[in-house]
Amino acid sequence: MAKTVKAEIEGLRAELRRHLHLYHVLDSPEISDVEYDELYRRLEKLEADRPDLITTDSPTQRVGDTPSSAFEPVTHRQPLFSLDNADSLEALEAWERRVVRGLEGEASGYMCELKIDGLAVSLTYEGGQLVLGATRGSGTVGEDITHNVRTIEAIPLVLLGKPPSLMEVRGEIYMPLTAFEELNKRQTESGGQSFVNPRNAAAGSVRQKDPAITATRRLAIWCYQVGHLEGGPPPPSQSETLDWLQELGLPVNPASERVDSRDGLEEYVQRALKDRHKHNYQTDGVVVKVDALAEQDVLGFTARSPRWAVAFKFPAEERTTLLKEIRINIGRTGAATPFAVLEPVFVGGATVTLATLHNEGELHRKDIRPGDVVTVRRAGDVIPEVVGPVLSARQGKKLRKWHMPKKCPFCGNPIVTEEGEARAKCTGGFECPSRLREYLFHFASRGGMDIEGLGYQTVDLLMKNDIIADPADIFTLGSEDLLTFEGWGEVSVNNLLAEIELAKDRPVARLLTALGLPLVGPTVAKSLTRRFWSIDLLMAASAQDLAAIDGIGPEIVSAVQAWASDPETIALVEKLRAAGVRLEDPEPESGIDESLAGVTLVITGTLERFSREKAKAAAENKGARVTGSVSKKTTALVAGANAGTKLAKATDLGVPVLDEAGFETLLAQGAEALTE
Ligand code: IVH
């Protein structure tokens, strides 16, 4: 009896997998969604009776994980490269000429693929089973999103045919346009925030902490590349790779085409451009790859990207619409920026209702007036922009020029433009609710104190109820402040308070970045705090001592000193201190170690005794600069196992290469070790 249940379960699983494949990969379903659901429910029921027979690769086991609190870093076995862009047909031709030069002859063929506007992921299959899904991240290190990736039906949990023993595939996760529209409809109905475009929605969906949410987002994937591979040679060309991926049950975009000449290339690009809105997903260009692997190997890589591939970017789209009104926004530094309120218009893949106008000077130069019909441009991710007025449409209308208001519409304080500055500023300081809102958002953001859960919505709520009026107030929040709000339960309140507690103990460089002084981003903040490891020391530092720090110029020195002497700063720092926020790093034991000052390192490959982050921190703690790409200015390349293109580049440029032992000697002996 038991045997028959087991057999039925296995039969159902195979059946369900076959239908998923027919639907997502072959695009030719044999049964309706309702029939699919019936089979699925039957399997669910059998498995509920016999939990001992449940396996992780069962179609029912896609969602079932408990929410995770963080995404673990994953070092990719081979880096995920990005592509060079060609933004015109001329640039594409120039690329093709470089290929011909590199190969000393024509390429035997090119693979043309649509450039899918989603997010790159890496999927690892071991023995045909999906074991890891990771974001691209920096290209070298991504985040483990396995639990979320497993919920995407288009991604097989088990490969078909004869999968290799180990294989890492890359592809683009995207949200189909229909799913995007439905999601936004649901979000709006439930009072949530809607997403600006399908790419953001897809990115937000794979980074959900709860896989059950990802599962409701109906994401899909097109696979386009094999990374690391064990247990068999890779197919000899990109076109055969795509065929193979498809045979293994992975979705491959059907619009991919092999062409064998430059004319074929241009024809494909033109067609893709014409058809760009015919798909149920967004494309932002065409990726062209030299088809034969042997030819790809001859061409190789630059420091950043392969020479054998290029991304032809579709041109920005433009549409005209009515400029209803010009308003201003006060940013976190107090800068007043005009923006356009538009009659909603669909352009470049998103509905645009607001567009930046930069500053008053630019507005007058372009002669843009409220009431004009204007041209709006939007390309990919770029913030929509008003190109200019359609002057012919202005005839007969009396439109007045726009001027920066004299008073801030948010706080009523004067708006002034200082001598020699392009930007007008609100003089209200933190009294200005618009400035405070942007400031608090920046303070709590990932680049700042990284307080998860404290985004615009929560900031707005806390400001509206007069609970916070400056960043220090965040640290004295109590559960009684939050529990009265609608939708806030014990769990969400405790989560936020725990995040805030953690943030109290961030390194001083983070606090400094969060405080947002002009010109002080994360890198400058690190340089400053290596020399002055507490806020008090930094505030008391002389101009001379500040200027002596590597990489700190006179503008930064003045910005730091102006900030340090501002009464608002002094009051804020005291308030942060009283709230228990850490204002100093541990003092370096024997003064500051600058034994690697002036040394620029690039670290690549896998080291045995250091993670990439640890190696970087060890070198930076001694005053070295660690950068991402090898150039003539690089002092040395630290190369671990499986170093790739950076090693080749360093050898090319005659940059010294250190192995792990050499790196340890460098850390121990300082820069002199390099001259021995
Ligand atoms: S191939 C070395 N093919 O575009 C080759 N990329 O800048 C690496 N993308 O990060 C990528 N569609 O996220 C490739 N058909 C396609 C693609 C594609 C979209 C994305 C991918 C990559 C970026 C390249």
Image (cartoon, rainbow, N blue to C red):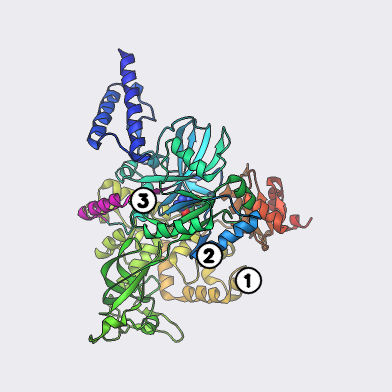
Q: Which residue is mark 2?
A: 91
Q: Which quadrant would residue 441 be assigned to in this image?
A: bottom left
- Magenta segment range? 172-192
Real-space Cα distance between discs 1 and 2? 44 Å
The local secondary structure at tag 1 comes to loop
Q: Which residue is mark 3?
A: 202
- Tell me the kind of residue under disc 3: Ala
Residue beneath the point at 27% across and 57% down = 193
Quarter of the image where the C terminus is located: bottom right
- Tell me the kind of residue under disc 2: Ala
In-image side of 187 versus 238 (left or right): left
- Tell me the kind of residue under disc 1: Ala
**Residue 185, percent across and down?**
23, 54
Q: For marks 1 and 2, give the one nearer the viewer.
A: 2
Real-space Cα distance between discs 1 and 3? 46 Å
Q: Which residue is mark 1?
A: 548
Do callouts 1 and 3 mark residues in contact (Cβ within 8 Å)?
A: no
The local secondary structure at tag 3 comes to helix
